[in-house]
Amino acid sequence: MNEDKLEPLEKRPIGVFDSGVGGLTVAKEIMRQIPNESIIYFGDTARVPYGSKSKETVTRFSRQIVRFLQAHDVKTIVVACNTASAYALEELENECDIPVIGVVKPGAKAAAEVTRNGRIGVIATEATIGSKIYNQYIKELTPDAMIYGKACPLFVPLVEEGLWQDPVTEEIARRYLMELIDCDIDTLILGCTHYPLIRSTLGRIMGNNVTLVNPAYETARELRQMLERKGLLNRETPGLGANQYQFYVSDAAEKFKQFANSIIKYGILSAKLVNIEDY
Amino acid sequence: MNEDKLEPLEKRPIGVFDSGVGGLTVAKEIMRQIPNESIIYFGDTARVPYGSKSKETVTRFSRQIVRFLQAHDVKTIVVACNTASAYALEELENECDIPVIGVVKPGAKAAAEVTRNGRIGVIATEATIGSKIYNQYIKELTPDAMIYGKACPLFVPLVEEGLWQDPVTEEIARRYLMELIDCDIDTLILGCTHYPLIRSTLGRIMGNNVTLVNPAYETARELRQMLERKGLLNRETPGLGANQYQFYVSDAAEKFKQFANSIIKYGILSAKLVNIEDY
């Protein structure tokens, strides 16, 4: 490695990764809450989705991506995918010499703080629900909480088809959420990065008495605190032309760019293709 | 390779592959139409789906799978995935020293034979529709045909969620098929291996005057003819305990087995896990 090239630690970028485009909702929150930071985003569009796959496979994929990000001198890694956070975070934390944070813990913490009646719902992929990871983290904070999980596998395809406000999405959401309504929850964790995009539909069905927790927002907040605590926060605004946000994908860069631009207001200049299986 | 182990050509298995479980509808037709044949099936469950990915990526994945199947001494390869057939068949045919057949050509041929008014609809993944491969094959057979393609990205998740007979699937199907009905087609190709599973919904919407073409059926027929022509048809019934049907996947073998058993009546004894990126 060329030592001359290395920036001081706090100026190095934050690595953010997801199975595809969903993690952009997390990247967007980081851009908004800590605007001085540079980001290297990786979306595993060749192997998306992760939510129906096994722990072993998701962990193998995540390790390859972490190697890719570390080769780009990131100062910390944000696992901006609930499934990868649920399945692989512990392994990645153990194997990395830089801080790694996921989206599950911050979401769980916020829900534990927000609930009044101690009844919390979690909607997420099959993998995340099956892992019971939200239950585990919430119970560590409030042992008496009751947690009700529901896998919602159709939400991601419905969001990606653009049906954010649509009677079909509403009907499917009613079916998925019915049992959570019956459980009298007062807090609902949107445990998959796509779900904040149908937040208004979910909110309408759950009603005004249920607080929706968006882990993307909580993760950016926790990231900021961690960087501050470790002296890694970038205090200077990056200069013009500093290439502050860089996007990499494992497939279909042009399509990624289009979807990404519908989520993030900051112009995404380009997305570069990486053969992630080589890492 | 151990020469002693090699069977006579006609006794070797047929390799069948797909991005996941969908190709089982093709394997099932092969079992039904040529019951003496042995099959090695590979489902790329770690990287499913293919239908929203690029030609380059789908071709790279397909090449790895072909190497895996050839390492198992198959006598021919059936690309039981419309997207892989659309994107990678030509490359695979050029690179393989054994016959490779896809599902697109047989489906196109059947549609060209069946249509009376020369107006043919194709429903498939974004990738298959974007490739215009059905158009190309049909035009080679009947240059005057009019072909209308429609990508239906929600059908695969709806089928995999088990909503084969459901008002939501009916509503989505009505939206997708409306423009094909307006085009006055008399033939509709089910250009994705999952679609025959919602055949009755599709048939109800299209009405009695539209013939549905199932490429799985046509492919098994063409495979049989090809094997006969090349002297590769197995004339003997495999003995008991011959392990006639073998299933391999790149992820989540147990889940594959469960879904597979809902499609194929022959008991699937086991599905073995393969790290396909190593091929």
Image (spheres, coloured by chain):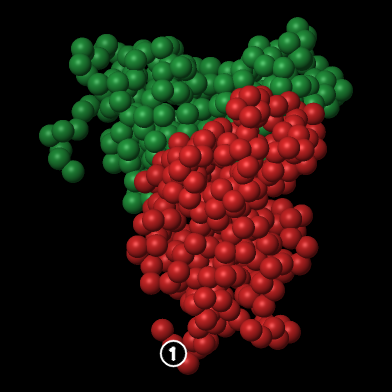
Chain colours: A green, B red
For this rendering, which residue is in front, B83 or A27?
B83
State the image quarter where residue A105 is shown.
Answer: top right
Q: Nearer the viewer, residue A17 or A238?
A: A17
Q: Is residue B123 visible?
A: no
Q: Position of residue A90 (x, y in %)?
A: 53, 43
* A169 relative to A265, above or below: below
Q: Is residue A46 placed above or below A23 in the rendered structure?
A: below
Tell me the residue at 54%/33% (across/down). Answer: B148
Q: Residues within 10 Å of mark 1 (few under 14, many from 20)?
A: few
Which residue matches tag 1? B3
The structure residue drawn at horizontal position 35% and vertical position 49%, both measured from the top left corner, is: A279
The answer to whether A277 appears left or right of B189 in the picture is left
Q: Is residue B129 above or below residue A141?
A: below
Q: Chain of mark 1?
A: B
Residue B254 appears left or right of A146? left
Query: Which residue does the image show at 51% across and 27% down from the upper left?
Result: A22
A96, A18: nearer the viewer: A18
**Circle 1 — which element?**
helix
Residue A262: % across, % down: 46, 17
Q: Against A202, is A50 above or below?
A: below
Instruction: List the single residue furthest toward the bottom.
Output: B4
Question: Among all residues in the image, which is located at the extreme left?
Answer: A4
Please give the count of numbered marks on the rendered protein: 1
Left or right of B243 in this view: B227: left
Residue B107 position within the rendered picture, expressed as x and y whole percent measured from the top left? 57, 51
Q: Is residue A279 visible?
A: yes
